[in-house]
Image: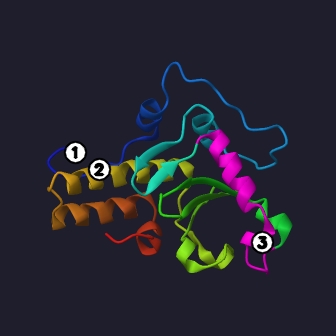
Amino acid sequence: MQNGMLKILNIETIKKELLSANSTTVNFPKKTTFEFPDNYKNVVTKIKTKELSAECILFDAVKSVNETKEFSDVDYWSENMAAEKIKDYWFFGTNGQGDSWVLHSSDKVLFYDHNKGELGIDNLVDLELNFDQWLQFAFLNKQLEDAYHNDSLTLALKNDYKSKLSELSTGLLENYPFEI
């Protein structure tokens, strides 16, 4: 952070940090029918599960397949959720508190707070982010955490954080699932 202000990193900088030169590619199983955005697939097939920030743990390909498979059971979803619609949701991360980051087949990132009840459209918060924007959000969130841990979190920095959330997406701050 320069001058105590936060910075939204460009996606190429983030990818360089996430991807090592000697990473092994682990592809998704051939029977997986989810239509992955290339930007998502190009990252998670080359990483191990990684904590980007306390609220944003990104699953590797294997972990995301297993999580999605577990949550594909209709018993996890509200009774009005049709089984064929469940295939439109891919579980790609967590916050470590039992909540999930979910990718919709339209490349929308959704947040599921397990305290809200059963999985269902009503309990998935649309943060108006795509996957690349979610990565930028995760790295922005990490900067705020670092300031907190270094006892340099000020009201001005919190306001800057809120401003940066709005830059990433008009609906992110409005639908933000955590306390700032």
Q: Dot 3, crowdedness within 10 Å: few (<14), some or many (≥20)?
A: few
Q: SS of the residue at dot 3? A: helix
Q: Amino acid at mark 3?
A: Asp
Residue at 48%, 50% in the rendered image = 57
> Residue 143, how many percent across, how many down?
29, 50
Q: How is the image coloured?
A: rainbow
As rendered, which of 83 and 163 lies closer to the eye? 83
Instruction: State whether the magenta stretch is mostly helix, strand or loop.
Output: helix
Magenta highlight range: 60-81
| Residue denoted by label 3 | 75
Along the polypeptide, which appears first: circle 1 or circle 2? Answer: 1
Q: CA distance from mark 1 to mark 2?
A: 7 Å
Q: Is residue 48 magenta?
A: no
Where 167 falls versus 177 (above or below)? Answer: above
| Residue denoted by label 2 | 143
1 and 2 marks in contact (CB < 8 Å): yes
Residue at 72%, 57% in the rendered image = 70
Q: CA distance from mark 2 to mark 3?
A: 38 Å
Where 3 falls versus 163 (above or below)? Answer: above
Q: Amino acid at mark 1?
A: Met
2 and 3 marks in contact (CB < 8 Å): no
Residue at 44%, 46% in the rendered image = 51
